[in-house]
Amino acid sequence: MNQQQGIRMGVWSLDHMHSRSYLSALRARPDVSWLGLTDEHSPALARGVAANLGIDWVEHADELLARVDAVVITSANVEHRDMALAAARAGVHVLVEKPIATSVADAREMVETFSRAGLVLGTAFPCPFSPAFRALEARASAGEFGRLLAINGTNRGSMPGGFFIELERSGGGAVIDHTVHVADLLRRLTHSEPARVHAEIGHGMYHQRWDDSGLLTIEMANGVFATLDCSWSRPRSFPTWGDVTLKVIGSSASAEASLFGQHVVHYPAEATPPRWIGWGCDLDALMIDDFISSVRDGRPPVSSGEDGLVALKVALAAYESSRRGGPVAISEID
Amino acid sequence: VYCRAVARSGGDAHCYALTTLRLASGAIAQVESSMVRASGFRTTGEIAGDQGMLTYDSDLDQALLSDLEAPGRAVWDGFPTTYTDRSPYVAQMEHWVRCILGREAPEVTAKQARDALQVALAALESAVTGEAVTL
């Protein structure tokens, strides 16, 4: 990438709704000299989205890869591996939507391929950029809570539909979708690695083959334990999409963080439910900024492919625990 | 029943526990048991089902808040506060008296208390062994 010319960026696939947020964050950056979009499954949709944003649409992924320095992959989970490896072959850096992949083998192949090629592989975890989380982490590291003992976490949301509920394309339901964010935050908060996972996984809200709810217990190597509610439990009437919360219990004090807790409430004149309008900062934009800086400066991104791989192992361990009916060691997940 | 529990400092009395449950119906549940809060009782609950969700948080459900702390006075007097026409403690006692007089059957039976205790003891067993306990 040429410092003067800026960076040429692509977004590959509109399957994941976060693609819209990444597109608008990328479009707002003066250092992005070219921004293109492709979606080979839905070319007409991609063409329309690109036209609305005033960016370029390209029909084929090969053409996109030939024109960019880096690409954001926002396809269905099972497609991440093939797309990322194609990008690596084209010498293109990748920020991949979470979960990084649907199997440890795929994720590991991605991490190793990018490492060998000297290319940046980032995982799209925006939560570490939350100022509330950063403050929580700083206080924990400064010893304000004493020794960390336990964490009660949530990443509850509404059922997203789309590829998320097509198991062949998603690799799982709520558990694979919503475990990875908090699993990643636990590592950053405890400075330790997940060692054991127990999970109760449910299908009681939508009564489908895909899991719609999960309650995980995650035990870190340093003895801190955490639970995580990763359920798609927010009904259509809920005033926002969901949450990421962490209640931290230390030996001398406790703290609660709600990463998306800052909001004003909008009560419409119509008889429709009120909405929470979040304020604060755009975590996706901060994450994109870090990724572009890492490409520019040749350093690892805050959320790397390795981070994505460890978080994925926690989600896969949860499914294995549910099958077995007991806790599963992370070392067993391969 | 799967439970992890911890003592805050020294001793072996747990002060914080996180328990997950799978019920016979297939429903899943999580229970947080905490004795580490400095500012008194807090009760929260959430029930999510296929027809909607109920949530409750006693911290967000205050009928009267005062900010008149006198120096040296404890922030918390040891009891949860509710503003109802009759204290739930009084209602409980009146109900118990009527039960003794043979006019009513207990709302909470000994069997229910035994069942709840069984779950709590299973959680304790899980906390000690690190394994899930099936009832």
Image: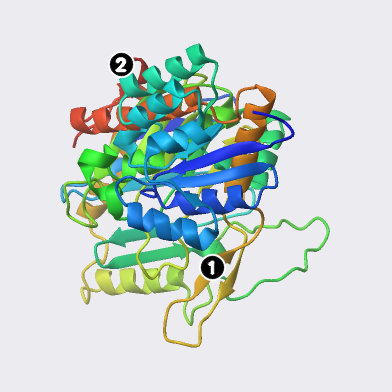
Quadrant, the N terminus of chain A: top right
Task: Report helix, strand or loop for mark 1.
Answer: strand
Q: Using the image as rendered, state which of residue A149 and residue A274 is in the foreground.
A: A274
Q: Type of residue at label 2?
A: Glu
| Label 2 CA crowd tier, 10 Å (few <14, some 14–19, many 20+) | few
Q: To which residue does mark 1 refer?
A: A276
Q: Residue furthest right?
A: B71
Quarter residue B95 falls in: bottom left
For the residues labelled 1 and 2, the Cα–Cα distance comes to 41 Å
Identify the residue at image location x=46%, y=47%. A37
Residue A119: mark in rendering: none
The single residue placed furthest to the top in the displayed view is A116
Task: Examine the rendering and report whether any part of residue A145 can be seen.
Answer: no
Q: Is residue A258 above or below residue B99?
A: above
Label 2 belongs to which residue? A332
Element carrying mark 2: helix
Q: Which of A292 and A166 is in front in this view?
A: A292
* Image position, residue A188 (x, y; %): 58, 29
**x and y percent of residue A92 in the render?**
50, 27
Q: Mark 1 lies on which chain?
A: A
Query: In percent of the image, x 55 and y 42: which residue is there?
Result: A126
- The residue sitting at 17% across, 52% down in the picture is A208
Residue at 18% from the left image edge and 37% from the top image edge = B135
* Vertical position of residue A195 compared to residue A9: above or below: above
Q: Where is residue B39 in the image (x, y as percent from the top left)?
A: 64, 53
Tags 1 and 2 touching, CB below 8 Å: no
- For badge 1, the amino acid type reads Trp
The quadrant of the rendering that contains the C terminus of chain A is: top left
